[in-house]
Amino acid sequence: MRILDPHIHMTSRTTDDYERMAAAGVRAVVEPAFWLGQPRTNPGSFTDYFDSLVGWEPFRASQFGIRHHATIALNPKEANDPRCREVLGLLPRYLEKDGVVAVGEVGYDSMTPEEDEVFAAQLALAIEHELPALVHTPHRDKARGTRRSLAVVAESGIDPGRVVLDHLNEVTVGLVRDTGCWLGFSIYPDTKMSPPRMVRILQQYGLERMLVNSAADWGRSDPLLTRATADAMLEAGFTEDDVDRVMWRNPVEFYGQSGRLDVSAVAETGATFAGNSIQRGGS
Amino acid sequence: MTTLDELRAVVPAQGWLGEALERVAADPAAIGRLFPAVGRRCGRAPLPDAPGWSTDEAARALLLAALPAERVAAEAETLYRYGDAAEKRAVLKALPLLPVGDAGVPLLRDAIRTNDPRLVAAALGPYARRLDDAAWRQAVLKCVFMGVPLAVVDHLDERADAELATMLAGLLEERRAAGRDLAPDVLALLDRLKGV
């Protein structure tokens, strides 16, 4: 089984997690830039974080044969802090990196005018840098936030096929199904979605444009819930090809639109990491 | 040491790279967006005719060299600051080929502080002769600690001294006390330093 977790905050995870993920079939990850437990108060905190997403984390992942990519953005919560607004001007440098496969997470947290402005500005950046966009739907007032996000996406002029609305659930999936946007679901131990509920959504709405992620971060979460969902799909009668489509081919197709997703080596071998050339210097 | 002319010979200024080099010469600020795109545009294959270099590293060195001389140090610093690991590595490897004097030393020190062996290794090329002895010894010791082959260290035998031998012997003693060992290239260096 091969899995691309299209949304996981590895910065918050231990190296042991990478090892367990590799053993469970995770061959590639996309790590979106987002808020941390502690709010940041200056642009330098963001650039150090972005540097980690295009530097340290890909290295850490590579030690376990996992390909690491990132999405870069000013997240909606911190978009409300005027001290962090300067980050918008620093994004173009990062949006040109090889490992950056989308603009994100953008979207809404509390649906403020500041969030409106920063969301729209970053969809424009996605168009300019020819990148897809990852839209976080808010945890509070989610249905209205999802509708409003769809309106902003439509107004921006970005191709809906290059946008994913994430953290959807039974209430919001129907709002997005016919918009042409991709649909993301985060599987969590307690909140968001669970594997059995995810399977029911796949049974009802089909596999097209469906993305399943663990969104594991600094909260109570589990980086192996992509694998648990894949197993639940098989138990429910989905085929191995169905699982491969949802867990690998769909996210490869979505982020592949960036022209920068590089999963060639892992896609070909599908095997665990054998070499240690990086550990030994790689030069 | 590989020269810019040797890199020009193996990575010709054609197609995307040719246009990028012209743009950078005419409009130095354009390098900010061109530099990160090099791997996607030029490829990343190793260059057999420029040992130790890959296509993207060579192309990035040529882009830096195409800048007006007075802009090189500042642009190299910014590109390193905002670079991903491959860009940082390319800047580090290009430093000895560029008219930057000692201005690149802080970049070397930054790379040596990282935990990424690719960056530590790239910092120990020919430009490392500008590091003071204490920093250079610590960097070599870090390579040993991280398992980076000592073949990456430029002028290793010429510069390795008794103080480095003492540091390496200390690490070896700790490793052996723990039932572990050091790599054969380190043991061989230690033997050479002790005159065995």
Image (cartoon, coloured by chain):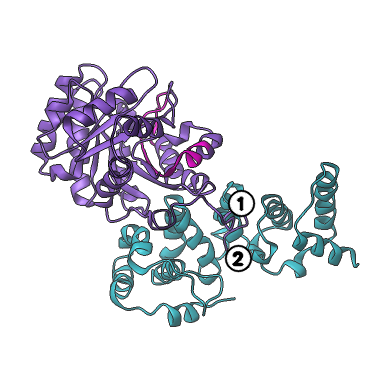
Chain colours: A purple, B cyan
**A218 in relation to B83, above or below:** above
Magenta segment includes A22: yes
Q: Secondary structure at mark 2?
A: helix
Q: Which residue is mark 1?
A: B112
Quarter of the figure with the N terminus of chain A: top left
Subunit ID for the residue under disc 2: B
> How many marks can you see?
2
Q: Are marks 2 and 1 on the same chain?
A: yes
Indicate whether residue A21 is drawn in magenta.
Answer: yes
Mark 1 closeness class: few <14, some 14–19, many ≥20 residues within 10 Å: many
Q: Residue at x 36, y 36 (%)?
A: A33
Residue A152: image location, x then y, percent = 12, 33
Residue A66 position in % (x across, y down)? 46, 47
Q: Quadrant of residue A232?
A: top left
Question: Measured from the top left, where is residue B34 in percent x and y?
Answer: 32, 62
Residues drawn in magenta: A20-43
Q: Amino acid at mark 2?
A: Tyr
Most foreground residue, A142 or B193: A142
Per the image, label 1 sits on a secondary structure element best described as helix
Q: Earlier in the sequence, mark 2 or mark 1?
A: 1
The residue positioned 48% from the left and 62% from the top of the image is: B90
- Residue to which mark 2 is pinned: B127
Q: Amino acid at mark 1?
A: Ile
Quick one: A176 or A201, which is closer to the camera?
A201
